[in-house]
Image (cartoon, rainbow, N blue to C red):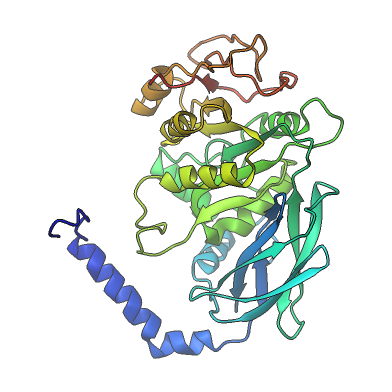
Amino acid sequence: MGGSGERAIPWWHRAALALEARLERSAYAQRRRRARPARIVAYRAFANASGVTLSGRVLADAPAAAARSEDRAWRNLVATFRRFASHELPDVELVCRFAGVEVATRTDAEGYYRARIEIPGGVSGPLWQDGEVALADGTLATRQAVMVVPREARFGIVSDVDDTVLESSVTRWPGALERVLLRNARTRKPLEGVAELYAALQRGLGPEPMNPVFYVSSSPWNLYDLLDEFLALNAIPPGPIFLRDLGFDPEKFLKSPGHGHKLDTLRALIGEFPDLAWVLIGDSGQHDAMLYAQAAREFPEKIRAIYIRDVDPSLDSPYDAFADGRSLRSPRSASRSCASPTAARSRRTRRRSASSRIGTSPPSPPRPPAMRPARRPTR
């Protein structure tokens, strides 16, 4: 290492990287790369004051059959396997369009595309608008939904997914694996009250939705279609979903330490929308409270409220202790808050008061059980 201060790569990580590289160079991999694109998975995008960034992935796999409530476990298992055995295509030329502007791009080594479209004069209009991505020859044209954040928006919502929106039981691995492997978007269950809570936050005081909702998760991009369909089926406000890639590179799903990409995503969103305040929602099953507390320290004037759902009110975990032991009072305290300032604490439901102001506070929305408003961390 010398004096560089870089951390040594463990032997098993070096071996995994070597194996991954060898597989990528194999004849089988080369044949797969020459396959014909069968579909474009266009991720929900968002527009800021200057334009929009469209992203997604090009695959040679045919779209999966629509999920059904009566699908048996084996059928869901096969669908899950196909998601993780996806056949991505590199170096595919694409054309992306939005608001009358067109740009060309191409997929990277793992089939992902990303195209920035600058819009002179900015973007306005309905909350959701349509972009399009297609192969360079015009075939395989695919709609790409774009969330246009209104100028009237007062705050943005960033939410974790597993055990915050979606019942996942990530703290109990047998149950978590059963849900991921053997269920589908129709048989996975939302947390009670989540749809109403997020709709109220998105609507604020106005008659129409205006506050943007973003979702961030440590799940891999292979599950994007399931998560997006799940939100729609359960009337949960849609929004861009930020996931992680599978692989052994330091920034990828199998190697990335902790859940720091959530904090990186939040930093990027704050940079994209410098005029917005933010409400952060997570759970006590993982590191959400710690990551959101760090965001509050870095952006004290931007983070207006943090809510941490207690995944197991009968048990105090280190994550619970962290959330309970922090004072999250805003330096600009207000008489009204985004949730009622006090709430009952019991073995079934435990909550903490929140005094952070969100512009002119929205009406008190319904909350799912065991949701704790956290408080600004003491320095």
Q: Residue 171 occupies which quadrant of the picture? A: top left
Residue 97 percent across, percent down from the top left: 76, 69
- Note whether 164 is above or below 336 in the view shown: below
363 lies above or below 175: above
Specify the quadrant of the image occupied by residue 152: top right
Query: Which quadrant is the C terminus positioned in?
Result: top left
Q: In this figure, what is the number of numbered marks?
A: 0
**Residue 220 spot, x, y in % from top left:** 49, 57
Residue that protrudes farthest toward the front in the picture: 121
On the rendered structure, is 1 left or right of 225?
left
Residue 324: quarter of image: top left
231 vs 178, nearest the viewer: 231
Q: Is residue 287 left or right of residue 302?
A: left
Residue at horizontal 63 percent and vertical 58 percent from the top = 225
**Along the horizontal axis of the image, is 43 left or right of 123?**
left
The quarter of the image holding the N terminus is bottom left
In this view, the residue farthest toward the left is 2
54 is higher (above) or lower (below) than 311: below
Q: Is residue 63 visible?
A: no
Q: In this view, does 81 lie to the left or right of 274?
A: left
Which residue is at a point 75% across and 19% down the rendered structure image?
363
Q: Which residue is drawn at 76% across and 72% down?
A: 102
Q: Which residue is drawn at 45% across and 29% down?
A: 297
Where is residue 96 drawn, in percent x and y? 72, 71
**Residue 357 visible, this orientation:** yes
Q: Nearer the viewer, residue 122 or 92?
A: 122
In the image, residue 137 above or below residue 227: below
Q: Position of residue 17 (x, y in %)?
A: 30, 70
